[in-house]
Amino acid sequence: MNQTQKIQNPETNVPKTPQMNERDFVNDQLSTEKYMTASYNIALNEASNQNLYQDLATIFKETQDCQRNLYNLMFKNGWYALEQSEKQKIDQTYQQFTGYKTQLPYNVQ
């Protein structure tokens, strides 16, 4: 059995006190931005007015970019870790979705 490896930068230390620290504030902002992008995505799917759709799309992109910048900040400071996937699982998933392409009614490159 392979041991899961974490992909993470060295952690920037922050005070561990009852008060919110920099990591807590950034994590809170990241969670908010994730929620907002999900909400804007729903609004985009349901917008019937083209002008409203364009405005929402612009706001969505700005919000998504903000979310990405916060993610990058957290990852850079070692406050966000990812689990490295096993090559076998990646290959299995790739084969699974490659097989789905043959079931589509149109040609996918």
Image (tube, grey):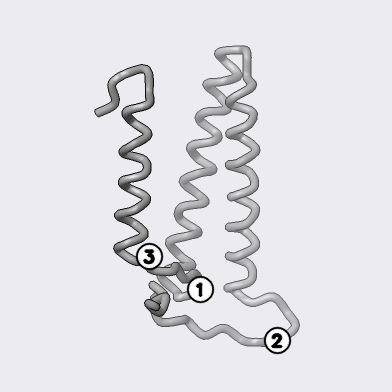
Helix or strand or loop: what does disc 3 sit on?
Answer: loop
- Residue at image mark 3: 85
Helix or strand or loop: what does disc 1 sit on?
Answer: loop
Question: In the image, what residue occupies the spot 60% across and 50% down?
Answer: 33
Residue 17 relative to residue 67: left or right: right
Give the alpha-carbon distance from disc 2 to disc 3, as whole Å: 34 Å
The three-letter amino acid code for the residue at tag 1 is Trp
Query: Would you call the spot at circle 2 few (<14 residues within 10 Å), some (14-19), or many (20 or more)?
Result: few
Mark 2 and mark 3 lie on one chain; the one further toward the N terminus is: 2
Mark 3 and mark 1 lie on one chain; the one further toward the N terminus is: 1
The three-letter amino acid code for the residue at tag 3 is Ser
Locate the C terminus by quadrant.
top left
Query: Would you call the spot at circle 1 few (<14 residues within 10 Å), some (14-19), or many (20 or more)?
Result: many
Residue 82 horizontal/vertical position (percent): 44, 67
Mark 2 and mark 1 lie on one chain; the one further toward the N terminus is: 2
Label 3 vs label 1, nearer the camera? 3
Rendering quarter of residue 59: top right
Helix or strand or loop: what does disc 2 sit on?
Answer: loop
- Residue at image mark 2: 17
Rendering quarter of residue 10: bottom left
65 up-or-down from 20: above or below:
above
